[in-house]
Image (cartoon, coloured by chain):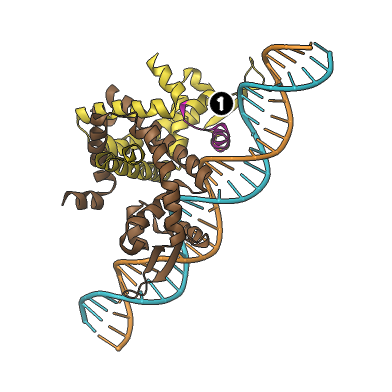
Chain colours: A brown, B yellow, C cyan, D orange
Amino acid sequence: MSDDVWLNDEQQRAWVRFISVVERLPGVLDSQLQHDADLTHFDYFTLAMLSEAPDRTLRMTELALVTNASLPRLSHVVSRLEKRGFIERTQSPDDRRATNARLTDAGWEKVEATAPGHVGTVRDYVIDPLDAQDVEDLHRVMGKILAKLDPEHGLRVQR
Amino acid sequence: MSDDVWLNDEQQRAWVRFISVVERLPGVLDSQLQHDADLTHFDYFTLAMLSEAPDRTLRMTELALVTNASLPRLSHVVSRLEKRGFIERTQSPDDRRATNARLTDAGWEKVEATAPGHVGTVRDYVIDPLDAQDVEDLHRVMGKILAKLDPEHGLRVQR
DNA sequence: TTTACTTAGTTGTAGCGTTAACCATCTCGG
DNA sequence: CCGAGATGGTTAACGCTACAACTAAGTAAA
C-alpha cells in the first residue's frame, strides 16, 4: 500500500538526480547563450526550429508545439526577436486569425553563428560524458516520459 | 572533424527528447503544487530538504547547495516562506554572518500534507512509465551528467 | 591593529513566464 | 445566414529569478 504512495530507494535516488539535472541544465545552457549571443536557450531553440522549417516559416501554434511553449510565452518571445530583426510576422492568407513567423536572413545568420558554441555546450555537459549505450538509454527513457508529458506528440511519434 | 562539432543522428534524437522533457517537466510539477498547495516546486523542495535535516535546520549556504539554487534566489524564497510561517530564520551562534533556516511546525505540517499529491505527480509522469531497468539507466545516465554540471557534488558522491 | 581579501547573506532592479481577459475569425447546427 | 461555440493570437498584471550592488563579519598578512 505505502509502496504505491512513496518511492523505493532506487526510484528515489534516480528521481533526486534527475530533478537536480532538470533544475541545473537550463541555467547552464542559458548562460552560455546569453553570454555569447545575447539569447536565452528558448530564443535560440525558437530560431533553430524556424531554420529547419519549410520556407523558414511556421504558424505560431505549430511553433509553440515544437518548442514546447505556451502561446503567450511564444508571442512574447517572437515579439522581442522581431524587434531585433531575427523574425518577421505575416498574416496567413488561408486563415486570417493565424500568424506566420518567418526567420529573416539576419535570423538565419544568427543561428549559423550561434549554433557551434551552443552545440559545444551540449556536448560538454550532456553528450560527451555519455557512451553510446547511455545515449540509447537516454533516448528510450525520455521517450517514455515524454509520452506521458505530451501524449499527442508521443502518439504522433508512434504512429 | 565535423563529427566533433555536430551531433550524430542518435545523439540528436536523444538530445531533442531530453531537452523537451527538461522544458516541460517543471511546468507540470509547478502547476500541481501551485494548484493543490500554493507552492512552487522549488518552494516544496526547499521545505522538504529542511524536513529531512537534523533539527529541521540548515544554514542558508547548505540549503542552497542541496536545492541547487543560488543564494539570492534562496534568500527570496525563504523570505516568502517565512512570511507564510513555514520557516523561521535565526542567527547562527558560531558564525554571526551565517543564517540558519528552520522548518516550523506549520512548515512540517505543510510538507506532510503536500507530499502525497506531489509524489503522485512524480509517479504519474516519471516513475510509473518506467520499468526497473529504465529507472536504473536513468540513475546511471543522470549521474554522469550531474558529475559535469556540478563537479563538487559529483565528487562528493564518488568519494 | 590596520588594511585588504574572502565569505555569508540580503536587497533592488530589470526581464521573463504564467494566468486571465480580451479581440478577431472560423465553423457549424438550426 | 445567423448565433453559439471553438480556435488563433495578443496583451496586461503579477510573481519569480538572475544579476549586480551592498552590508556585515570573519581571516590573514604586515
**Residue lying at 36% horizontally and 57% vertically, measured from the top left:** A50
Residue B78, magenta (yes or no):
yes
In the rendered image, which residue does mark 1 sit on? B60
Q: Quadrant of the C terminus of chain B?
A: top left
User: Picture quarter containing residue C11?
Assistant: top right
Front residue of B127 and A127:
A127
Residue A67, magenta (yes or no):
no
What residue span does the magenta drawing correspond to?
B66-80
- State the residue lying farthest toward the front: B1
Q: Residues within 10 Å of mark 1 (few under 14, many from 20)?
A: some
Circle 1 chain: B
Q: Amino acid at mark 1?
A: Met
Residue A147 placement (x, y as % from top left): 24, 45
Q: Secondary structure at mark 1?
A: helix
Front residue of B109 and A101:
A101
Horizontal relation, residue A11 to residue A85: left or right: left
Residue B128 shows in this picture: no
Residue A57 placement (x, y as % from top left): 35, 63
In the rendered view, tell whether residue B130 sits above or below residue A89: above
Residue A68 placement (x, y as % from top left): 35, 51
Secondary structure mostly seen in the magenta stretch = helix
**Residue lying at 46% horizontally and 53% vertically, measured from the top left:** A110
Residue B13 placement (x, y as % from top left): 27, 43
